Image: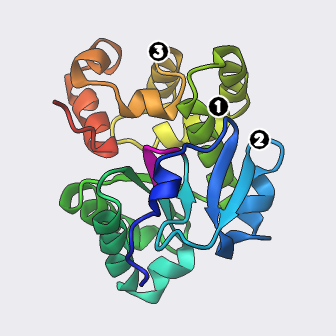
Amino acid sequence: MESKPVPAKLLNAAPPYGHIITHEKWRGSTLVQSLKGSVKTIFEEELGVVDFCLSNKACVLYVSESDLVAGNGYRRKIVRFRNANSGLQGIVIVEKTHLSEQYFSGLQKFVVLELGLTLLPVSTAAEAAQLIAQLVLGENKENPFRRKSVSRLLEPVVLNLVQQIPGVGKVKAMQLLQRFPSIHQLCGASVHELEPIVGQATAQHITAFFQKQCT
């Protein structure tokens, strides 16, 4: 059944550093081809509605331009994704293009406010691959020097993503990335940590954008 959870064998053993577990349906795709040289893919058929497992803590569902334009069917898939993998950090990556932009605000409200998932927009599959690589390599804490160099290589795509947060322009985005050099670190930042850099209002926009659940 499509909504079954990620198999325990995948959750109990994180992929090796620089690897990502990918649904078999993505084999040969532009996105996977774009991952070459940054992270290695391990293909697996038994991922249910999950497209990518980044680690034993986070998984990704990909919503394409065609998914958005075709109607609201993608919403049921996102709900199954959330319900089947409640023990993981759920990340929804969506193609925000000229054609699909009109549907983005509705998707953002549904994914972030109603379901409590993280929503990350990209413009192309190649850009999504760069973002996924940043997320995968940012998970690892054992090789900070390697991670830092990769972060610098991917800075343009990360900078573009951060600038899509309400109230964040290029200057603030650069200041944020100097303090929080990876998407994972920025996702985990509290309003208190963000305020000195961007002010209280924008700090709240940022935590809402990434749906940071404070404890």
Q: Which residue is mark 2?
A: 38
**What type is the residue that disc 2 sits on?**
Ser
Magenta highlight range: 55-59
Q: Which residue is mark 3?
A: 179
Q: Compare marks 2 and 1 and give the one earlier in the sequence.
A: 2
What residue is shown at x 67% (from left), y 52% (from top)? 129
Q: Nearer the viewer, residue 4 or 208?
A: 4
Q: Quadrant of the C terminus?
A: top left
- Residue 57, quarter of the rendered image: top left
Q: Compare marks 1 and 3 and give the one earlier in the sequence.
A: 1
- Residue 84, quarter of the rendered image: bottom left
> Does residue 121 show up?
no
What whole-number distance in Å separates the C-alpha atoms at marks 2 and 1?
14 Å
Q: Is residue 56 magenta?
A: yes
Q: Give residue 94's position: percent from left, percent from top.
A: 49, 62
Q: Which mark is residue 181?
A: none
Q: Residues within 10 Å of mark 3 (few under 14, many from 20)?
A: few
Q: Quadrant of the N terminus?
A: bottom left
Marks 2 and 1 in Cβ contact (< 8 Å)? no
Q: Left of 185 or right of it: where is 32?
A: right
What residue is shown at x 70% (from left), y 57% (from top)? 42
Q: Residues within 10 Å of mark 1 (few under 14, many from 20)?
A: some
Q: Give residue 100's position: percent from left, percent from top.
A: 49, 73
Rendered position, 140 above or below 75: above
Q: Left of 214 or right of it: where is 178?
A: right
Marks 3 and 2 in Cβ contact (< 8 Å)? no
Q: Give residue 123's position: percent from left, percent from top.
A: 60, 59
Q: Secondary structure at mark 1?
A: helix
Q: Left of 75 or right of it: where is 179?
A: right
What whole-number distance in Å separates the C-alpha atoms at marks 1 and 3?
13 Å
**What type is the residue that disc 3 sits on?**
Arg
